[in-house]
Amino acid sequence: MIDLHSHSIFSDGELIPSELARRAMVEGYRAIAITDHGDQSNIDFIIPRLVKVCQKLTDAYAIQVIPGIEITHVPPEYIFELALEARKHGAKIVVVHGETIVEPVISGTNMAALQSSIDILAHPGLITEEESLLAAENSIYLEITTRKGHSLTNGHVARVARRTKAPLILNNDSHSPRDLVNKEMARKIALGAGLTEEETGIMFHNSELLLKKASEK
Ligand SMILES: [Zn+2]
Ligand SMILES: [Zn+2]
């Protein structure tokens, strides 16, 4: 299992990175990206610290731990520059907190994210076909999430992505150890979103592709 979207105490997660990585390892994960919520106030603080600990954990354990960021509730006009800044600080996975229907994420966030140098648009809610086409064009992964609330629109995301050939990725968006679902449950959630077994396999493979790309950076 690979999860490229998770949270530590550097935002609203329950665990420090070392425990998160160890718990994920024990659950059989091969890789996890720690992508705490970031805006202009904190990315220069969070990312270098994650870079440091992720390297130590990857060296010590049989799990790859990747430093990242989830740009969250940032006004759309600043997303482009903040994504570039996050990369400069060392984020290897850049996620944007998309327009989930369970939070008042401002409209225009999905569009701004898909025009920026990011890897994953998380929980994109009622994403439009136009936005999804842009995801396909810019090779940005749209997220199918196992997280409660955000997962309410998984079926919609799966359908629009299929129509527009946008790549999908499955993440847990874990904030606590109980959110680290195993691959079998992840598979069931994907099937529940209306994906076929084949599409689910491709989606899991996309995690490998993005992990490889992130490790090469
Ligand atoms: Zn989010
Ligand atoms: Zn998140």
Image (spheres, rainbow, N blue to C red):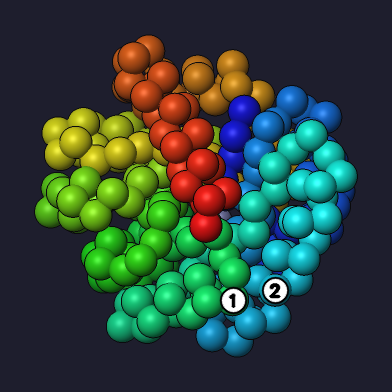
Identify the residue shown where x is 53% and y is 51%.
Answer: 216
Give the percent coordinates (x, y) of residue 40.
Answer: 54, 85
Give the percent coordinates (x, y) of residue 74.
Answer: 44, 77
* Pointer 2 or 1: first along the chain: 2
Q: Dot 2 corresponds to which residue? A: 48
Along the line of sight, the residue nearer the viewer: 206 or 125: 206
Left/right of residue 45 with respect to residue 25 in the rendered view: left
Mark 2, other Cα within 10 Å: few <14 / some 14–19 / many ≥20: some
Distance between the Cα atoms at labels 2 and 1? Answer: 6 Å
Of the residues shown, which amino acid type is indicated by label 1? His
Q: Quadrant of ligand 2?
A: bottom right
Give the percent coordinates (x, y) of residue 19.
Answer: 86, 48
Please tell me in which quadrant of the rendered image residue 168 appears.
top left
Identify the residue shown where x is 29% and y is 33%.
Answer: 158
Identify the residue shown where x is 37% and y is 24%.
Answer: 202
Of the residues shown, which amino acid type is indicated by label 2? Pro
Determine whether label 2 and label 1 are within 8 Å by CB. Answer: yes
* 109 shown above or below 187: below
Left/right of residue 104 with respect to residue 27 in the rendered view: left
Along the line of sight, the residue nearer the viewer: 11 or 67: 67
Mark 1, other Cα within 10 Å: few <14 / some 14–19 / many ≥20: some
Tag 2's secondary structure?
A: helix
**If the image is split into quadrants, where does the N terminus sit?**
top right
